[in-house]
Amino acid sequence: MKPTRIRTERLDLIPATLETLQSDREKLATLLDAAVPGSWPPPLLDDDTRDAFSLMIAEKGDPFFATWYWVRDDPAEGGRVLIGCAAIATPPTADDDGDTVLIGYSVLDEYQSQGYATEAVRHLIPAIFSVPGIKRITATIYPELGAAIRVLEKNGFFPAGEGFEEGTIAYILEKDD
């Protein structure tokens, strides 16, 4: 999937590249034209994850892999600030149909509970479903992550049993035909 830049009410969702994924904080700020808080990266986007994302982009082994940086773009709130990210990929438990992608997202702690994740996911859904062949988006969430579950539910996802990781719940959104 070739991700595109997406503008929302308050966010600029910018596709990640090898260069952005491998940049230090200062260079990333320049490339995104945004301040990068000292608390960057958010939970779940550690060095190992960034290395795995870089490898996935470089090898082009997953035709559905894409990742976006979330830049809050609101002059009234202090201008452009990097606050989170999201990625999609073929799930590790993909069926033979190849019509499902897995979504994951993470927001810096100080920007949580402000509706940013709900807004970003709401705008990513049509972009994801515009890719030929994708009919379903799934997410796996630990049950104690209530805010992440609410993001999914607000965007129409429904619980669908156990997730592929031990102790997680699967949530699914089906494409309307």
Image (cartoon, rainbow, N blue to C red):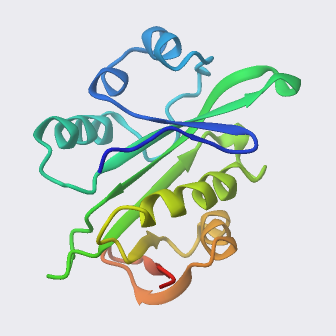
- Picture coordinates of residue 158, whole percent (x, y): 56, 85
Q: Describe residue 22's horizontal placement relative to residue 103 as left or right.
A: left
Q: Describe residue 50's horizontal placement relative to residue 159 as left or right.
A: left
Residue 61 vertical placement versus 57 (above, below): below
The quadrant holding residue 118 is bottom right
**What residue occupies the far right of the structure in this picture?**
76
- Picture coordinates of residue 174, whole percent (x, y): 47, 82
Q: Residue at x 75, y 53 (%)?
A: 115
Q: Nearer the viewer, residue 73 or 152?
A: 73
Residue 44 vertical placement versus 177 (above, below): above
Q: Residue at x 19, y 43 (%)?
A: 56
Q: Describe residue 163's horizontal placement relative to residue 60 as left or right.
A: right
Please count the marks in the image.
Answer: 0
- Picture coordinates of residue 5, whole percent (x, y): 50, 38
Q: Residue at x 67, y 64 (%)?
A: 147
The quadrant holding residue 20 is top left
Q: Which of 47 and 153 is in front in this view?
A: 153
**What residue occupies the far bottom of the structure in this picture?**
161
Q: Describe residue 9's horizontal placement relative to residue 173 as left or right.
A: right
Q: Which of 167 and 97 is in front in this view?
A: 97
Residue 77 vertical placement versus 160 (above, below): above
- Picture coordinates of residue 82, whole percent (x, y): 60, 28
